[in-house]
Image: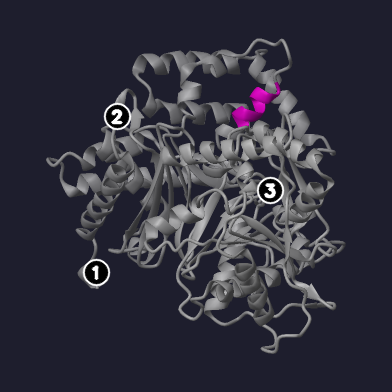
Amino acid sequence: MPPTPKTPVDSTAAGPMLRYQKNLPKLPVPPLSDTLRKYLKSVHPLLTEEEYKRTEQAVKEFEAPGGLGQELQKRLVARAKDPSVVNWMEEWWNDQAYMGYRDPVVIYVSYFFAYKDDKFRKLPAQRAAAITTAALEFKKQVVDNTLEPEYAKGEPLCMDSYKYMFNNCRIAKKPSDEAAIFDPHQNTHIIAIRKNKFYFVDTVYNGKQLSTKELEQQFQRVIDQAGGLKGIPVGVLTSENRDVWTDVRQALLKANPRNKQVIDKIETASFVVCLDDSSPKYRDDLCRACWHGDGRNRYFDKPVQFIVFDNGKAGFIGEHSCMDGTATCRLNEYVCDGLNRNLIKHGSEQIRGNIPHPEELSFVLNKDLEHAIQAAETHFDDLIARHEMTVLAYQSFGKNLIKKFRSSPDGFVQMAIQLAYYKCFGVSRPTYESAQTRKFQRGRTETARTVTDESVAFVKAMEDPTLPNEKKIALLRAALKAQGQYMASAVNAHGVDRHLFGLKNCLKSGEPVPAIFRDPAYAYSSHWYLSTSQLTSEHFDGYGWGQVVNDGFGCAYMIKNNALQFNIASVKDLEVHGKKYVRGTYQFKQCLEEACDDLRDLLMTELPAQAKL
């Protein structure tokens, strides 16, 4: 049974999924003095004494009575109170963090989940069909607004972003992309991609949804129709720089009227199923194949793409601009858990006759478009060649033991990441952890700044063999407390980063940029050498994304009951502050393993003997 929240129910809501939506609180604007105090505290462990004094002075000037900081705060508060504005940050954030972002979505924006094997579905058409049936069941709950809302500590979370899950597409435009939502009742088809060729597969025939057996037939038909020869990979264009793709998309639409019909069918589809002809065998290979594949057998602008490989392995890639990973994690958990526990209704075993074959959607191309596709292939291959990704599947312990250590599992892993980075580089650097703010209307994320004076003292102590365990444990407890306090503030929208982002956006044209935003500490403290986030499912064998800065790491992690898993991505030949680290991704992976071992060994010393069993 769902919890009974304090949030009032809206009796006029379209369905149970949205019954709390209108009554969720609006995103607050924190007091200026609180944010500036937290900001100073967060930059202190990252700066020299001289740098900190300069930052302190810039903050004092910004906060001074009658100063620009006070004026910007008034403007932001007024914006937040405007009845026509649902969320004061939404428009700015969506544009500047996502839609206006011009680098390719693959690597820099998209993220993936890699599934564990399905022992009962080894054939690609078989597994694709089961996944599709489960996803359509989830879609029906979203479209009908019957999906139960999500909760955090008994209170409902915003469900608005679910409208971007199905029948949605990111549309390349200048200077900023757009999100397009299409009628889910009118568009009951999906798109299958095989050998770089697009196929239209309607999931409804004669008013009735195709059963899993019927879908399996359709996917097998796609595989058979596609044959052995690969088509010209038009999909690789979606891996391009967004301005380049905008221009090519327009040229594609103008080249022949048929191209618009094809693009319309792709963009309006419920979702995409990529039937890859590769067979990744090992975990690292599977994660890379889900993260980007060969770039050809994809349409990266779709927010939901399931990937099924020739050996029956499977996964998911999501486009991040309108939806954060918590929503699609729930979709994927529903699919995997439902299939694993046989909760999905697969329909009749009998296949109806005369179901139309999948329709191949063929683009009409000219020489200019073919050259653009070739250029996109080259750009994609160069981009992928510059990146590394590896997975640490740590099997020594997981959430169950961490709780015996009287520690927050998330905080514990964050300290393991900090210790690993210190082992690798001998210093602590700015770290981002995603904190969701979905308890507010159209809330998305806030930054939880993990590096604190306490975390720095802890990692230094851990690398000092002369210090007793009792001292190290005390410093770990202090670091965990600081991390937990900041995370609690962040999920309540009282972090540093989004508030400062809002204040900066309140500057009017021609106004001087305050010293706080020109101070090198402002840019440095949000240069995320470590970009981290947790989403967990016992059914996933991988989850991750790329690094957000080229001298840093993307570090996604899962905290399972009896295991930890880290997905680490970075550029090859990582260069940090002038020093090159060949295979830096793998060095960091080893340091993570050592850090987890060290923390386990440390805390086992204070665990009662009976709890170690």
Residue ID for mark 1 = 612
The residue lying at 55 percent from left, 13 percent from top is: 515
SS of the residue at dot 3? loop
Q: Tell me: residue 377, above or below residue 205.
A: above
Q: Quadrant of residue 283?
A: bottom left
Separation of disc 1 and disc 3 at Cα? 41 Å
Which of the two labelled residues, at mark 2 and mark 1, occupies the earlier sequence position?
A: 2
- Residue type at the position of mark 3: Phe
The scheme the figure's colours follow is one colour
Q: Residue tagged by mark 2?
A: 580
- Note whether residue 345 is visible: no
Residue visible at 70% across and 19% down in the picture: 507
Q: Secondary structure at mark 1?
A: helix
Q: Residue furthest right?
A: 12
| Viewer-proximal residue among 75 and 5 | 75
Residue 331 visible in the current orientation? yes
Q: Amino acid at mark 1?
A: Lys
Q: Tell me where the magenta segment starts and ends, as one range.
A: 499-506
Tell whether label 3 touches label 1 (CB within 8 Å): no
Give the secondary structure at mark 2: strand
Q: Is residue 501 magenta?
A: yes
Q: How far across and how far down the image is residue 294, in percent? A: 50, 50
Q: CA distance from mark 2 to mark 1?
A: 42 Å
Query: Would you call the spot at circle 3 few (<14 residues within 10 Å), some (14-19), or many (20 or more)?
Result: many
Residue drawn at x 74%, y 24% as measured from the top left: 75
Q: Earlier in the sequence, mark 2 or mark 3?
A: 3
**Can you identify the residue that label 3 sits on?**
440
Give x and y (percent) for residue 137. 69, 72
Q: Where's residue 114, x and y in %?
A: 48, 61
